[in-house]
Image (cartoon, helix red, strand yellow):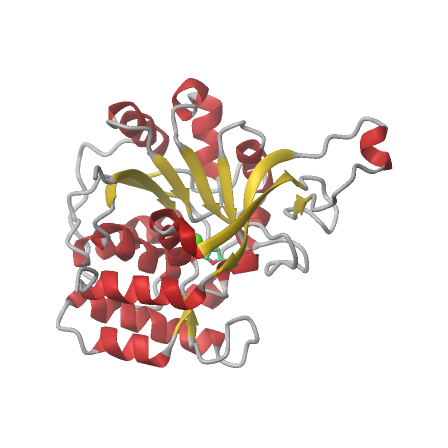
Amino acid sequence: MMPLQVLIDVDTGVDDALALAFAVLHPAINLRAVTCVAGNASLDDVYRNTRAVLAVAGAATVPVARGASRPLIAAPRDAAHVHGRNGLAGLELDVPEERASDVHAVELMRQQILASPTPPVLIALAPLTNVALLIRMYPEVAARLERIVFMGGSASVGNATPVAEFNTWADPEAAAIVVESGIPTMMYGLDVFYSAAVSADDVAALESSSRPVAQLCAKLFRHLAVKDAGQKRIPAGTIAALGDAGTVCSVVDPEGLTTRRFPVSVCTDGSRSRGQTIVDRRSHRGESELNGASLGQPVDVALQVDAGRYAELYRRTILGTLES
Ligand code: RIB
Ligand code: CA
């Protein structure tokens, strides 16, 4: 079977790194390009971390490009308290040399969408600034995407604020542009983000592998385990969330995810709900719609995940034991 053509937009980021390693190593994915945006870390850190992680995973030749260094309108805000000093748990990895031919992230996405033999899936694991710019600059090219799968938002509680998840809170205007684009979209939000998680045994198996990429993933999970310790967000018996990596698992194994299509809108006003994804789970229209308000655009919202299935899929992909 022809592999899925995939573009990934990242703000690497500990769990973005875990996601990149998985995307490189899973045989059903042809990773065409990776684009970088400021978010969990600064754009410089994201660009450096991304190239370093791809090199460890054996994919140093995958094109990587820098994109937006800040959100469309909001002030830039990182998540250094989660991802560490350099966005990558303070790990110092070898970084491949920069290529002189590097283009802007939006141009790289455009080129790769046009060159792809089948409509690619765009997986966005970061604030949606680059994706929104693509949609605004090249709407006819963006419309060729099979779909956008983004990590962000929530149909329940937030993390950056009581109601807003980090990626949609960091750039709400960009998230609104994506949701309103009319491109088929799946939201892998906080309703599942922390639920797919690895156990101590999973991490020990990665640690004891001779593969450098597995050892890197183990270190990243150990970092997250310290952050997740004592938090009630991850399931009992696990030590660290797959986070962004779960989003990529859902693209190769959609059977492990329960989604439902709901109208979704993003709150972009200056209120305390800024960045909230408003997921309309009502079965009947209310007075606001009867008076002309919009319900939002249809989005496939992830509601439940088979956590054990994705932990195993992740571990076996990184260990290279999928076929056994
Ligand atoms: O909200 C969870 C955050 O951690 C997001 O930035 C996500 O992409 C992950 O990196
Ligand atoms: Ca991320």
Residue 85's x, y, as percent? 39, 66
- Report whether residue 87 is seen: no
Q: Quadrant of the N terminus?
A: top left
Q: Which residue does the image show at 50% across and 37% down from the upper left? A: 185
Question: Residue 200 sits in which quadrant?
Answer: bottom left
Q: Which residue does the image show at 40% across and 57% down from the upper left? A: 246
Question: Residue 215 sits in which quadrant?
Answer: bottom left
Q: Is residue 265 left or right of residue 31?
A: right
Residue 150's x, y, as percent? 47, 45
Q: Which residue does the image show at 36% across and 66% down from the upper left? A: 311
Q: Which of the pair 180/3 is nearer the observer?
A: 3
- Report whether residue 297 is seen: yes
Q: Which of the pair 319/84 is nearer the observer?
A: 319
Q: Is residue 37 left or right of residue 263?
A: left
Q: Which residue does the image show at 38% across and 21% down from the upper left? A: 141
**Farthest residue in the top direction?**
140
Please, is residue 222 above or below residue 120 in the view? below
Q: Is residue 261 left or right of residue 240?
A: right
